[in-house]
Structures are given as C-alpha cells and as structure tokens.
Amino acid sequence: MELEILKSEIEAAIPDCRLEIVPNPAPSAQHSLRVAPEHGLAVAFFLRDSCQFDFCTNVTGVDWPAKELTEKIKVKQLVDGEEKEVDQVRKTTVPGSLEAVYHLYSVERGLGPLPLRMRTTDRESGVHLPSLTSVWRSAEFQEREIYDLYGIVFDGHPDLRRILMWDGFEDHPMRRDYVEPDDYEYEPTAHDEVLARAKEHAAKANTV
Amino acid sequence: MSRDRGSRLLGEGIIKGLAETARNFFGSYVSKQRLTTVQYPEERIPQDESFRNFPFLVYDGSDPEAGLRCVSCQICEKECPPKCIFIEKSKDKKPDAVGKPQFYPTVFDIDVSVCMSCQICVEVCPFEAIKMDVKYDYPTESRFAALLFDKHQLTKSNDYYHQIHPTEASAVDAALAAEREAAATKAAAAAAKAAAAKPAATAGAPGTATASAATSTVTPPSDTTAGEPR
Amino acid sequence: MTTAWAPITEPNATETPSLGQPAPRPAVPVTSDSALAEQYLEISMGPQHPSTHGVFRMNVVLDGERVIQLKPVFGYLHRNHEKIAETESYLGNMPYTDRLDYICSITNNWAYALAVEKLGGIEVPERAEYIRVITGELTRLQNHACLLGFLLQDMGASGTPLMYAFREREKVLDLFESLTGARMMCNYLRFGGCRVDLPAGWLDRAKAFLAEFPRFLDEFERLLVDNEILMERTQNVGVLSRELAVSSAISGPMARASGLNYDIRKADTYSIYSRFSFRVPLGHHGDVYDRYMIRFLEMHESVKILEQAMRDIPAGPIQNPAVKARLFRPKPGEAYGRIESPKGELGFYLISDGSGIPYRYRVRPPSLINLTVLEDLCLGRNVADVIAILGSVDIVMGEVDR
C-alpha cells in the first residue's frame, strides 16, 4: 500500500519517530498517518520538502471523550476451597484525548488526501501539540480555531488566541461534554408562550 | 482588454463605459428587458408554481377534521431540522377519508419564525398530509406568539392545494387514488379467498357464510399497507 | 473572444523546495520607538461596514494612509453549524449547508453530498450528475456576476455595475426557483442524486438564458474592463506570490490568478467533469486586476461547460434507488470530500460512528483559508486598497464563521 511505503520512507529519514497507520473502514479508503506529537514537526517538514505535500488544505480537531468499557472475563478464584472459574465484570476506562487532523495534498504530484493525525495525552492538562504553522501557513487560522473550539494549545504558533468566539469566552464549545450556559445574553428564538410550549413539549417527550 | 492603456486616449475607457450606461438608460424606455424594476406592492411578479414557503396540512373533502390526511405518525416532527413542529397524538381513532380508523393530531403547531421552509417534512411524510404553501407575507404585531401556527391555521383544503400547485396536486391525487385502488383490490382478493375457503371448511353450513363475506368487501385497507412509508 | 489577455494553461513550474525553511510570514515593520508608535492610527474597519462583505472586522494599524498591520477579526456570524450538525441526521444537515456560503447554495449541497457519498460508497446516476453540473455551473455564473458587481461597488462605482450583474443573477435565481422551489436556499441535492427532476421546459429556458449571457459579458467588458480608474486602482495592488499561495492553501480563482494551476475540477475530476472540454484561466501577476479578470474568464468557461452539459444530458433516473434519504446510516469511517466551489476548495470532513448522526462534521471553508494572507497582501498599501483587496478575495461571512 502506498501509505506503507511512505511510512517506511519517513521512518528511514527520521530515526525513532513513532508512526502508525490508522485504517479507514469506509469506502473512501482515506487511511491516515498518526504521528506522536514530539516528532510532528520533523515529520511535517519531511512531508513538505521531500515528498512535496505542500498543500495543507484542512486542519481540524476531533474530540474523543473517555470511554468506559465493560467486559466479562473469567477469573480463577477460590470458592469453598476449590479453584473455580468465576465470571467477573471488569470495567476499564479508555482515556480520552483530543486530536488534530491535517489533510495534505500535493499540487505537483497530484496526490492526496493524506490525513496526518496527532493526539494529545489527555483532555485536561496535557493538551499541547506542536504547531505546524511554520511548515504550512494555512494552519495559522485553523489551528487558532481548534484552540478556540477544542482547547488544544499549539506550541510555537505565532498568534494563538480565540478566533470565532469572543476574547473573554471561557470553555471550549465543540467538545462533546460542553454544556451551554443557561443565561443567554441574547434573546432566544422562541419567546413567551412559544418558549413555554416548546419547553413543556420537550419535557413531555422526555418522560414518555 | 490588456493591462496597459496602449495607444488609447486617457479617459477613453471611462467614456466607453458611460456610453454603455447611456445605452442601458435610454434602452429602458424601449426594451422591457432593460427595465427590470417592478413597482411592488402594486405590481407583482407572478410566482412560479414550485415556489415554497411554510408548510400546511391538507384535508380531503369539505370537513377539515374528518378529511385530514395527517395520522400523527410524527415523522415530520423527528426529521424537521430546526425542530419547529410540535405534535400531540390523539388517544382515540377516527375514520379517515377512506373510512379506516386512524389516529389524528390533537395538537399540530408549527413555529414559522423558526421554520426555514426546507420542505424536508413534505419529503418524509408517508401520507401526503403536509405540503408547502406559497404565502410569504405574514405581518403580525406580536413577534412570537402570532407566528406559532396551530392546527386550525395550518389546515387547508385539497382544492386550495390544487390552486397553488396544480401539477403537484394532480400527481399526488393520482398516486393516492392508485394506492387506494391497489389496497381495495387486495382486500377484495383476500375476502374472496376467505369466502372460497369457508364453504370448504364448513361443509354443512348454508350460503350465509359466503353472503357475509361478500358484504364485507368494502373493508378499508389492512393495517400493513397504511403504516408503510411510501 | 479576441483579447490580448488570452487564457493559457502553463505547465507547473517545478521549483526545488527549500529544506526545512519555515513558511513565509509577513514582515511587520512596527517600530519599538514609543514616540513614533503614538503616531500610528489604529482603526477598526467593521463589523458594520458596507464594503466588508458581511460582518467582518479588520483591526488596521496605519501610518498615515499606509497599512502597517492588519488583523482580521470575525466570528460575528458564528452559528455553530458544526455542532448543530452533530445533533442532526445526515438529511437534516442538508438545509444547513445551504446557509454556509449563502450565495452558492447548490455547490455547498454538492460538496456535502460528495463527502457523504464517499463515506457511504454511493453511486450517482448519470442524469443526476449532469443536473449537478448544470446547476453547479449556473451557481458559479451567478456568484462571479455577484462578485464583479460587488467589487466594483466597493471601489465606488455606486450601484450601476452591481445592478447590471444582479439583473443577470435574477435570471439564474428564477431558474433555481422553478427547479428547486427556492431562489437561494435550494436544498436540492441528496445523497445519490437530486431531489426532483427538471420540470418541463426548464432546459429550454436555461438554454435561452445561456444564449443571451455572453452578450451580458460583452456588455460588462465594454462597461468597465478598459476603465482607467479600475486599472489604476487594481493593477499591482495586493500581489500574491505563487509560493505564498501554495503554502497558505489558497484555492480557487485567487490561487489561479497567482499562477497556481490547481483547479479541483481538473485535479480530482470528481463527478463527470472529465467529459467536458474547458480551459482553466491563469494569471501572471496575482494582483486584484488578475483576480477580477480570472473570474470574468471563468464565466466564459462555465458557459462552455453549460452548453456541453445541456446538449448531452441523458434521460434516466435522478436518484440512486438503494439510498434512503431518511434513516441513512453509513458504516463507521471517515471521508474528506471536496469540490471546486466558486470561492475555492470547499471540503467536508465527516467521521461516522455508524449511527444516523455524524460524529464529527467539519466544513473546510475557502473564504476563511483565503483570508489567511489578507495581511500579507495589504501591508504597505493604502486604506483604499484594503477594500479593493478584500473584495477580490471574495468572502462570504456565512462560510468564514459557519
């Protein structure tokens, strides 16, 4: 597969960089390349300069919240002096993370799209990723948008501040666990009797 | 056109442009094509038939309650993108236009200040019950309450539908008629089969069984056909 | 059309990429001398401004009339479209895509439908593809007419060329109204086809419109193209170099005016564009004049595509029967689908988790990406040039902010 070849080329050029191919089960077959954040900048420069992926069209963020997996496993336990296999329910938490996805194209070679992904360590404090603005200028505004809406802090970005929300805004709206505030500063669409009817309807729909 | 003026006089381009403007100005007195202003609201551009703005509920016949096509399946409510439809289903059933007992909506409100006339509700309705209206001017004094249309305001007759969208309404009528016919023939076939089976089962019984089977051929379509999406 | 500025398609210049060199940044000549710094004037152009193409704000620092810093500020039309899309079904998102670049609703629908079709592996019947091309190119015509009018309006030709352009645009909108039911918010395309077929007589009306359209283009050319004021104000103003265009992922007419030969209709050959013969106009200088002329020439090319499409459109179904619009559940996976919208590359990135609602829905807005270089283009120019440059970028705030 072409992506395998690309991966081995990158690994040859940048020693001990951690790369993995993320397969895409959809018919679009756009498999991604995930790179560890510490090697992100080096891999990006290599892709731009040696592989001519000079057109980074789309930079976006994805939120993967923490998931709890429950599975039934058999455990050997002492029951009444005998060793038996007992069913136990084991719950594991897969830690959540935020992800930045870069879609790369090559204008001259006509290649693409190559999604390049980087994951943060977690969703609370370990949300730093290297900024690829120095590689592709198009990442400038889009990384600002990811910072604004997801909360990923891009180290090395020339001007990291909010872009769509206003400057004093707190929290990051596109996260899956974002709760919108109850005290709207603006008038909601429905008002007076209409709002009352919509609320009572919603309440009824939830209880039914 | 080229990037430099070449050998043209200074101002020649501007004069050519003004000549074009003059042609349009004087031409508007002679040619209708150049005069595109319409003196609204005294003069109105005739609306195209396919224009759509805000939905309404269709009823057949002359009684808005009895002929209402809507059976309160609430599919339009679920699919509406801005969630501006509020429906409450009835507890009892009433016979619909063909006589089959169906649920009906006791409350059917559409908040037209939210509705974006995307006509997805029309597309997903399996019963041809909700269609797009064409009226676009609804000046009201109350900003919100007056733009919450209730069932009474939304229900309009099939004749009105024919007036505003003639080709579409004729197509819908033909489709509904074909559906009813198909259902009727299916019911007749089922009844005939039942009538044929009965004398074989009850060998000694007189022909009363067949007579009762024959009178019940006017049964409305069975449950399965009414609930199927089209 | 005989012109000295004939469109050419030049082969891509292969430049040796510089290794490890960072992407170009604007040189901001802001002095640290506080006395001089006090002389700089900081103005905020917008968000309510007749020439900023919507609610768009630019914080401009001026030295007299010269721009020494420009920071665009937007988000005034942010309607959290992407978050709403995470709560609506795939079909329910289609009307919202109309409202992204609200002038070109059908190409927005097309990009979304393309992304979903890539995600679900859905095929589109031939007649539907032809209808998509016809309506898509009509959208391009009316968008470029709109842009030409607005650019000239912003530069002071108060209303006349705008109204001439809108006169033609009205004809296209009337065609859309009789086809889709709405002039601008068409909500016409579906996954695997189109919503309704062409009504009787529509194609003839479209052909009649197309027969007259080149006359409008010639009229517009006579009206303004040789105009000295226009030439003085737009030539060598806001020059965008090809390297910066590639690095900033500028796409569409803005990139092609800088000599970057990248048209997604030719590069990706999505839909049935490979069947039509049309050229891609390129510019040499990358200034406002080139961006203006590029759109002019693109309209001519669109007319050619339309003629071919309307001649060759076959009969047949307009919707893939295997796809249910309602209760559409693609398998888990992701897809990035893009088209050449009139503004540039419009892409949709969808992640599906197997349910009927997208897990992640991202719009790649060409207007936002094209704004990345606004500062670079405006540095050192006058304030009046800022308006002309912004007009030539062709932004629609619905797309920038989503």
Image (tube, coloured by chain):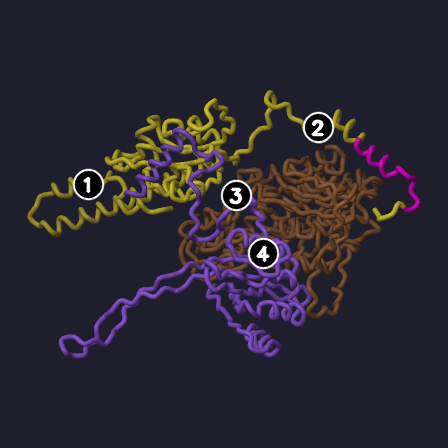
> In the visual, does C12 lie left or right of B99?
right
Residue A83 is left or right of residue C154, and the answer is left
Q: CA distance from mark 4 to mark 3?
A: 19 Å
Give the answer, above or below, for where C285 lies relative to A9. above
Which numbered tag is attached to residue A143?
Answer: 4
**Residue in the foreground of this view, choosing between C285 and A124:** A124
Q: Secondary structure at mark 1?
A: helix
Tag 2 near tag 1, CB within 8 Å: no
Q: Kindly indicate which chain is depicted in brown in the rendered structure.
A: C
How packed mark 4 is, by other alpha carbons closer than 10 Å (few <14, some 14-19, many 20 or more), is many
Image x and y of residue B189, in percent: 25, 47
Identify the amino acid type marked 2. Answer: Leu
* Residue C121 visible in the displayed image: no
Marks 3 and 2 sit apart, C-alpha to C-alpha, by: 38 Å
Rendered view: C357 above or below C154: below
> Is label 1 or label 4 in front?
4
Q: Main secondary structure of the magenta part?
A: helix
Depth check: C170 or A122 in front?
A: A122
> For residue C79, which numbered disc appears in the image?
3
Farthest-out residue, left: B204
Marker disc for residue C122: none
Callout 2: chain? B
Q: Which residues are magenta?
A: B6-21
The picture's colour for chain A is purple
Q: Nearer the viewer, mark 2 or mark 1?
A: 2
Q: Is residue C375 visible?
A: yes
Rounded to the nearest angstrom, the CA distance separating label 2 from label 1 is 69 Å
Identify the amino acid type marked 1: Ala
Q: Is residue B6 above or below residue C264?
A: above
Given residues C203 and A91, the one toward you in this image is A91
